Amino acid sequence: MSAARDPRPLTGEPVALDLLNTRWMYEGAQQDLLTDTDGLAVWLAANGLEGFTADEATLRHTLRARDALKAAVDGSLTEGAAAVDTVLEHGRIRPTLDTQGPGERAEFADPAWGPAWLAARNYLELMATAPDRIRGCAHDSCILHFFDTSRNGTRRWCSMAACGNRAKASRHYARTREG
């Protein structure tokens, strides 16, 4: 798998949800981008994180963050919060001041935790912004997640062209068979 080719059906979501979307369904079978460091390199590149090394330690920590985020998003926040918090223990935000004014920089005792920490931190930002807009696709056989940026907040599908269309076709087929 080359770093230039991302096989996932949904990309471009905030980094926390994009990490969850490294697992997806294809023809009834679950796919996983993060089975090796090549897949990690694809994910890092897709999220502008090429400054981090796609090695075994980074992969291990990123998988831990994905599991923690999955527990928080799809499970119970009570259980998931502790797992996300454990990932967050591996980094911090350092306030900075430079010629452009005040800022902040993420710091990690071990850089291998960087991508995992950034994804967990992004989840906190999404929770602070609009927790009700963090969604899983409404299609029964889809496991993708998205941040609903629609004006009225009613998006249901990861992609209208894929899952939304399948759901509409399914409903239409059911109606025509009844009639």
Image (cartoon, helix red, strand yellow):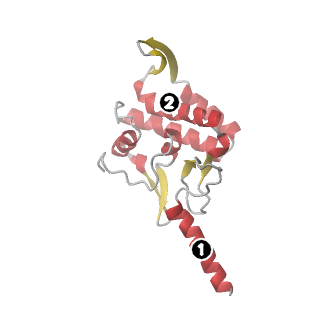
Q: Is residue 7 above or below residue 15?
A: below
User: Does label 2 or label 1 sit earlier along the sequence?
Assistant: 2
Q: Say if mark 2 contacts mark 1, CB within 8 Å.
A: no
Q: Position of residue 73 (x, y in %)?
A: 62, 44
- Identify the residue shown where x is 56% and y is 50%: 145
Foreground disc of the pair 2, 1: 1
- Identify the residue shown where x is 46% and y is 37%: 62
Front residue of this view, candidates 112 and 48: 48
Q: Is residue 114 above or below residue 79?
A: above
Element type where label 2 sits in the image: helix
Q: Kindly identify the amino acid type of the residue bearing the numbered disc 2.
A: Trp
Element type where label 1 sits in the image: helix
Quadrant of the snapshot with the C terminus: bottom right
Q: Classify 10 Å Cα crowding around label 1: few (below 14), some (14-19), many (20 and above).
A: few
- Identify the residue shown where x is 39% and y is 34%: 49
Place residue 46 in its image quadrant: top left
Which residue, given by chain and number where applicable, does mark 2 sit on? 117
Q: Kindly identify the amino acid type of the residue bearing the numbered disc 1.
A: Ser
Place residue 53 in its image quadrant: top left
Count numbered badges in the picture.
Answer: 2
Front residue of this view, candidates 158 and 59: 158
Which residue, given by chain and number where applicable, does mark 1 sit on? 170
